[in-house]
Every structure is written in C-alpha cells, then in structure tokens.
Image (cartoon, grey):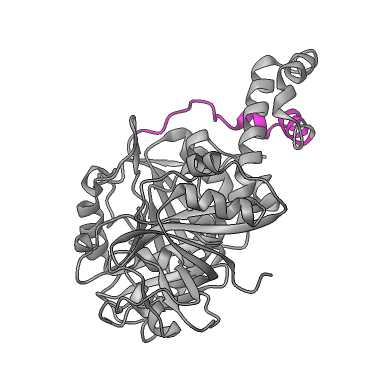
Amino acid sequence: MTVPRLAHNGPVTDSPSPLAPLLSDEGQALLAALRDHDPAHELALATRLRRDHPAELVSAALAQARLRQRAVAKFGEQDAYRMYFTPHGVEQATRTSVAAHRAGRFRDIGLPGPGPARITDLCCGIGGDAIELARAGFAVTAVDRDPATCEIAAHNIPALAPDAPPPAVVCADVMAYDLSTAPAPDALFIDPARRGGRGRIFDPEAYSPPLSWAIEAVRTVGTGGIKIAPGIPHELVPDDFEAEWISDGGDVKEAVLWHDASGAGAVGAITPGARRATLLPAGLTLTGRGLPNPQVRKVGRYLYEPDGAVIRAHLVAEAADELDGGLIDETIAYITADELRPTPYATAYEITDELPFNLKRLKALLREREVGILTVKKRGSPVEPEELRRKMKLQGRNSATVFLTRVAGAPTMLLGRPAGRP
C-alpha cells in the first residue's frame, strides 16, 4: 500500500513518509492485532511485541491503536479503524455526522458544473471534513501546513471515499496558498485552528487564520463555509453571511458561517443575515423569524430546556412560540408552559415544587421523598452541581431533577422530573 504523493508549496522533499512503517504488511498485521487492546496493560504488551517487531514500529502501532480507539466516538468503528490520526487530529476533527451535514448543505447550494464541483478545504487536518465532501461527490483540494498531517489526510480521503474524484492534498500555509491555482475552487471550507499553546482561543482574530481573513477569502471565492466556535458573539457575524449553530445528540458542536454570492442554490439554501439551529442526528432546523423576547410568566406545570444550539442561535423566542410558552426570567433560557407539547427543540420536565433557594429545605424534601439519584441543572446560579449533590447526602430509591435558577429575578429551586416519567 502506498501513500499518495503530496503537492508542496515549495520544494518537494524525499523524506520518508511517517505512515510508511504502519502501511507495510508487518505494520498492518500489528495494527490488526492491536485493534481491541487494553491501554491499561500496554507496557507488558509492548515488551512482548518488541521480541518479534522493531521497537519503533511497536511504539507507532500502539500510539495509532490508541488514537483509533479514541476516534471511534467521532467516526464510528468502520471508518475509525481504516483511518490514521495524530493526537491533535483526533481532538480537533469534526465528527462524521456534523461533517456529513455540512457537505449536504454545500450540495444544496447547487455549485455550478460541468463535472464535479470543486471545494478547497483549508486547514484540512487529518481529512475528516474532506472525506465527507468527497463522499458527497465534490472534487476536493485539501490544504494544511503540517507535513505529517497532510500525509495522513492524503491516505484517509481516498481510503474512505474511493468512488470520489481523486483528491489533491497540498502542504502549505493556507494564508499563503494561491486560491487562483488551477483548477480554481467553486467554494471554500475553512476550519481555523482555535487552540494554541495555552489552550482554547476565544478571540476570533487570534484564530489561525484569523476570522477576518477567512471571511474575505470566502467572499473572494464567492461561496463557502467557515467553522467557528459556538460561543462567537452575534455582532461578529457579517450581514452577508448566514450563521448556523449545530448540536449532535444534544451537545452543541460548532457554528458555521455560510456565504453564497451566486444565488444559485435552492430557495433558502443560504440566507444572508439568517440565524438557524440544526439538531442532529434528525437534521431538524429552527430558523429565526425576528420574534420579540417572550413574556415572563409564573412557573407553569412544565419547564422546557431548549437545545443548546437553539440557545446559542438566540432562537429561544421561536421555540417558546411553538410551545405557547413564556420565560421564567427575562435573562434565563428556560421556557414555562401549562401544557405538554412535543417539540424536538427542547426537553420537557414536569415541575412538582417551586421553592425559594434554601439548601436545608431542599435536603429535607429530598430525604422525605427518598431521592437517591439527583440530576442538577443550573442556569443563573453560582452553585456547582457536584457540591450540591455532596451536601444533599442522597439516599433512597427514587430520582428527581432540580433546577437552580432565577424566577422573576429571585434565586429559586424547581424540583421535577422528565415529562412522561412516573
């Protein structure tokens, strides 16, 4: 098995591929044997394997086996065990469900032909996004500045999208990469690095490349998407871009800024200035309608906790409108209503008790009701859930959910259970 040759922004070197040992017959056999190994017993396993294999190969195979086990959560078993990773690549890669959703949105834009539309993936990493773009039928050019990462992407993309147009993988600084290089892209996807030596980066202008550079690059090409942190301030979203917040299984994963100057897509494919929340795996989308903030009401029988993507997209008003509900506090994203209505955009709880904030009173109530399992949710409260559970000294066979929050400005405890449970 060979690794596809890379294009370089500069001279091509003849240094050995970091994957070459693992792609050998011996390396492949070793990886197969390590598929289900237990990292807790790795030292003894490594000692045994080094009797029959070179020490460097054993170390590389063990490291890759660990990374594949971690990657299963994002890519699934079938794909993860056919891919290669770096530690940073596993951590930063987009999970398959989200990348596939994004590829679908590019498809909805209706990029012009003839032939497969061309998308350039800047900051491609180990190729997770490029794989789904290729699977969607696009001709992909993947660009990253790290040679080892590019080597891995050059393997992963064709291995997992064998029927797609052959990808081009370019080792280059994306800010120096010439986007007019033939064939010029029909669209861009950019995933700026949002971690540095000191951890997560919150300032979009400290991304690599900076958000402002990515925005202008997409505008230059005309069509594209930019992956950003979901906590981005709304005022930083340009008026000619749509902003989409995406959750998967209830966890907010990312936001994407979308731009399409061509207007070639289906109606509503990309809407400048729009805000939307997309919930995976169902693929349901809530779009902003410019509704005013809901009125504050007394706590009703049911409390709805909006999905994180709905909250991040500032679409709580749209969710409340569907539920004919109001807010418990003008600054708190909990919706209250007297009726139980099915909605994919929020989780419903039946409220049994509304108490002023008082831990002694809560402890007594939980003991009286024999609550041994307590789910703690907080919004607008400084109390830490683990600290609260410890102080409650829970005992009993029943379960409950407590919301530490504010109701009409007052610190409050709401006790209840998921709607529909006895």
Nearest the eye: 79 or 153: 79
Quarter placement of the C terminus: bottom right
* Residue 303, position as x, y percentages in the image: 47, 71
Q: Give the range drawn in magenta.
A: 11-32
Residue occupying the point 70% across, 28% down: 39
Q: In which quarter of the image is residue 417?
A: bottom right
On whether residue 91 falls in the magenta region, the answer is: no
Inspect the magenta stretch and tell me whether residue 17 lies in it. Answer: yes
Q: In this view, does 166 lie above or below 110?
A: above
Q: In which quarter of the image is residue 46?
A: top right
- For image coordinates 52% across by 34% down, the residue present is 87
- Residue toward you, 28 or 248: 248
User: How many labels were placed on the picture?
Assistant: 0
266 and 19: which is toward the camera:
266
Q: Which residue is drawn at 52% across and 79% down?
A: 343
Can residue 345 be seen here? The reply is no
